[in-house]
Amino acid sequence: MLIRVGLVLLCSGIISLGFAQIKKDKRKVEKTTSVFTIDGNPVTADEFIYLYGKNHPNKETDFTSEKIDDYLTLFINFKLKVHEAKMRGMDTTATFEKEYNTYREELRKPYLPDARLTDSLVRLTYDRLKEEIKASHILVSIKPDDSPEDTLKAYNRIQEIRNRVLSGEDFAAVATTTSDDPSAKVNGGSLGYFTAMQMVYPFETAAYSMKIGDVSNPVRTRFGFHIIKVFDRRPAQGEVEVSHIMIRTGEGKDNKKAKETIFTLYEQLQAGAKWDELCKQYSEDPASKENGGRLRAFGTGAMASVPEFERAAFSLQKTGEISDPFQTQYGWHIIRLEKKIPLPTFEVLSSSLKTRVNRDERTELSKQALQTKLRRENLFEQNSKVKSAVFALADSSIQKGKWIAPKFPNAEKEILFSLKKQTYTVNDFLVYAQKNQRPNTNPPVKYMDQLYNTFVDGKVLEQVEKNIMNENPSYRYLLNEYYEGILLFEIMEKEVWNKASEDSIGQRRYYDSHVTSYQAGERVKAALYSSNTTEFSTPLREIILLGDESKVQEFVSQKKIKTESGYYLKGDKSIFDKIPWASGVYSAENNGMYYLAWLKEILPQGPMSFDEARTAIISDYQGNLEKMWLEQLKKKYPVKVNEKGKQYVFLQLLVK
């Protein structure tokens, strides 16, 4: 803080004189002042301040008037190149749009309502996992794409069933005779205890919103209409890990003998027999008998098909405790408790829970609800009559992804829908639909509706993004950084990097006029071959001495020998300390590696040859091309620095 204040006192007179006026109307300047213009296009002081601060974090020594001036020069050069790229239309190509939109989608994720939606869903799901609900249901089946008439018929039927329950009839009895869930014939609609992520989301949400004894209104899921009755709510039991010994029953088995066997085993265990030995000898569960009958940990509802097993497992309280023998549909069991696993903390579970939530139906349904809300907030209005006429244009060719939009009367002016004050025409949508159609199996009108909703949601997202940029300047600047960064890379590649690399005549001309800049001490032109064994050395030496470099390359490639070549000073490689500094072929060992060094030519101190200096020449030539190009751009696009804006920049960066 004090350092920056001190720097202000050292600023030039013109900056100091400007401070008073800037302070007088600071808020107005902040909103309106540009720091410079290029071809009449302003670059705001706020953008410059943001980028300078971002690129000089916590570096007090960088906040000086000299360094800010230097950065301003670099920033002007940067903006000149980007402006030229825009004028050439480089930001309108399909390649640019694809790359930019990929970055854009990633950058805006944290700012979108979707990000907050996922976080809230994860927290809500975790809170529900802390409780288990015991409930029953009655189902009237209906498919998602059934006709409105069939849907209404199903709704009326579930309402009639609900009225019977509300009038006092036993829920289980009604479920047994009316539910389309086949299991209701056996269990009276009982689902036992369940927790979050075990039922379809609308069903789960309804159940968790109810009190004990409540009967829900009809709940629509992908299976149809349900009514739910809640019988109990209890704290989550977490998970349990058990081992079991099983004697199977059923067709072809002596069920009486199975029962006698399990009780005999129980008595032996009570007398001190070893669990693992009895399990290995008698258990008829081949998947677990060899490891002491140990099963994977499971939670409430995971053993819904064998409720007796789940009930017995959770009834055990102490590690090592053994249950009484009990029977399930698969046979007779004895269970031993290995450990109880409480529900992990939110911090521990949140990452894996987020993955599950993102894959679950709740995310999609919540996004649909959010999208409906966003449409409402952005004053979405559609022309239903025009929409129907547009959808009628679809034919079977759209199922192949080859639909060509026919002419539509006044398509460029006919409004299809609007968002706030922005209108979108029939032509806007037809262009989108034709470009984005893909092969599909949906009826043409239904697929057209999918395209339409995707198009509308995309435009809603654009409106949302505008609001985000207005509320979050840092996001706006970051997005612009990527936008301009991609353009800069493309135009630099075209105007400087590729030109310098490919223009061998220009490189030679540049070298000839700057030859004195490329000097070197005594050096060697050499090729170095190395391996972790010495087997290659003798045969390779013989090939080198024959003078056929193509055979040398063939040999090292076949034997996969490490190779490097170029011009070296004596101190560049430690291997040179172990061989004569003279032309020839030499063997040496260094740090466990075996070398064959071919010193082709010792070059005296002096100017480097073109080939020797080529890497440096290309780099310098690039700089020269960029300098000349910038001079052309400054003539093509006038640059005007706004002194008032510049002074404001100094005020913000130097006075803290």
Image (cartoon, helix red, strand yellow):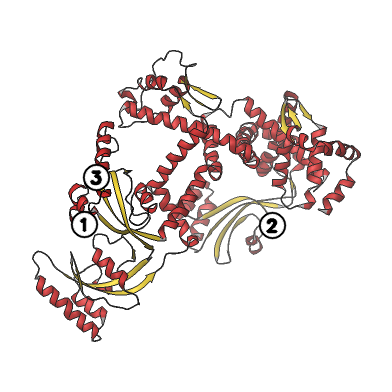
487 and 242: which one is in front? 242
232 and 81: which one is in front? 232
Quarter of the image holding residue 479? Answer: top right
Q: Which residue is mark 2?
A: 570
316 and 56: which one is in front? 316
- Marks 1 and 2 sit apart, C-alpha to C-alpha, by 89 Å
Position of residue 417 measured from the top left corner of the image (x, y, whole percent): 47, 24
Say which label, 1 or 3, has the lower sequence index: 3
Determine which of the numbered discs, if any, sits on residue 77 in the image: none
Q: Which residue is mark 3?
A: 161
Say which label, 2 or 3, has the lower sequence index: 3
Position of residue 214 measured from the top left corner of the image (x, y, whole percent): 34, 53
Residue found 34% across the figure and 54% down from its top: 198
Local secondary structure at mark 2? loop
Determine which of the numbered discs, if any, sits on residue 187 in the image: 1
Disc number lying in front (1 or 3): 3
Which amino acid type is marked by label 1?
Asn
Local secondary structure at mark 3? helix
In the picture provided, is 35 more to the left or to the right than 213? Answer: right
In this rendering, does residue 356 appear at all?
yes
Position of residue 31 measured from the top left corner of the image (x, y, whole percent): 73, 34
Disc number lying in front (1 or 2): 1
In the picture provided, is 549 more to the left or to the right than 476? Answer: left
Position of residue 346 measured from the top left corner of the image (x, y, whole percent): 48, 60
Say which label, 1 or 2, has the lower sequence index: 1
The residue lying furthest to the top in this view is 409
